Amino acid sequence: MLKRVVVTGIGVLTPLGNEVNTFWQNVVAGKSAAGPITRFDASLFRTQLACELKDFDPSAFIDRGMLKRTDLFTQYALVASDEAIRDSGFDLAAMDPFDVGVIWGSGQGGLDTYEEQVVEYARGNGSPRFSPFFIPKLLVNMASGMISIRHGYMGINYTAVSACATSNTAIMDAFNYIRLGKAKIMVTGGSEAGITPASIGGFAAMKAMSVRNDDPAHASRPFDVSRDGFVMGEGAGALVLEEYEHAVKRGAKIYGEVGGAAMTADAYHMTSTHPEGLGAAKAMQLALEEAGLTIADVDYLNAHATSTPVGDLSEIHAVLNLAGDTKPKLKVSATKSMTGHLLGAAGAIEAVITLLAMRDSVIPPTINTTELDPAIPAHLQIVTGKALPAEVNVAMSNTFGFGGHNGIVVFKKI
């Protein structure tokens, strides 16, 4: 018999706050984290804005030796997962360490380290003076490995990669291992350190990013008729998933139940989503069926909506395909309008948002959307401008990634 799975801990490191409480307050308040890039000189780049972390000093959380041995994406993972683990409050000493695992995600891994080392190589006229930490720092699986080493978790441990659907892939895998009885607790989520010259330059060259450089705070505008691309974000989101009976027995705080999760592939295009959202609609349907629900039961959808012209509409089409001729009661918001797009970490911080929306009965807003795309039907309830008080018993979080990956997670209130 399959086990029930609940969320007992959450943690974040985001452009809107370096811990959960500040982050959530800013999300509900509808604040924008976007501004000019300060991480490097972007004056000659097509896109010169991003959602950077603010007042974050990794040395306050990680010792000097570890900082030398880890890339930013791993450091972000350690900070967010530490918060989630503290929040969950489980006692490893009372458990078999092989019952606790880590499945983490990142789309780009140690890109910052890779750029730094290759540039140093080029400046050295081809002299192979690489750091002995070069390879360990850039490996995309290193975040999951370092979380387990830091805490002594000896169970299932690996990394998921499915571009911007990565975090939901990791959450789904963690969910499945627990309900199959192969783990009691899983630390899961994603981290990304994508504000680098190569990352910004590469996405900008694809014309995937906003060029509203003179007005960064209003650049990410999902569903708006004038949207022109996404805004890069950075950071991490973490969740502690736990077998329901185990959580109840130890008196754990429960944010919600993972009702279902599913993935499909668009099999359509390298970077574009299917224009009618066929793969996305099927993934949503499968995740809801696994939860014993339909689209009619969903109160809140945290949309993937990144503020790209094609992607936002394909997600709307997917929802409408699933709803058919009936008007869905669900309310939709796109929180990337505030956080920017954290690529492989997006699904994790949006899962945290979704769970807190259920806890506090409030739907966060989509900011900067002043004129809805006329292709979006009026009966679809997009929450814009300000947060909306509303009972949320069932919520769904969508993620879609380059390569045609669709990852959906459904949460239920307990």
Image (cartoon, rainbow, N blue to C red):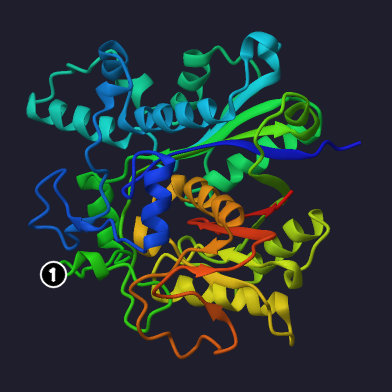
Residue 89: percent from the left, percent from the top? 58, 24
Which residue shows up at 74% across the image and 48% down it?
414
Q: Residue 23 versus residue 110: which sits nearer the camera? A: 23
Mark 1 closeness class: few <14, some 14–19, many ≥20 residues within 10 Å: few
Residue 185 vertical position relative to residue 19 in the rendered view, above or below? above
Picture layout, residue 166 above or below residue 58: below
In-front residue for pair 165/5: 5
Please give left or right for residue 400 compared with residue 63 in the image: right
Residue type at tag 1: Asp
Q: Quadrant of the N terminus?
A: top right
Front residue of 384 and 306: 384
Whether residue 405 can be seen here:
no
Q: Position of residue 373 (x, y in %)?
A: 43, 86
Q: Residue at x 29, y 61 (%)?
A: 32
Query: Splitting the image into 4 quarters, where does residue 291 fall?
Result: bottom right
Residue at position x 74%, y 85% from top?
326
304 vs 99: above or below: below
Image coords of residue 56 (percent x, y):
25, 35
Q: Which residue is mark 1?
A: 214
Q: Secondary structure at mark 1?
A: loop
122 lies left or right of 137? left
| Res 180 visible | yes
Quadrant of residue 207 within the rendered picture? bottom left
Residue at 71%, 52% in the rendered image: 413
Apparent side of residue 248 relative to residue 215 in the rendered image (left or right): right
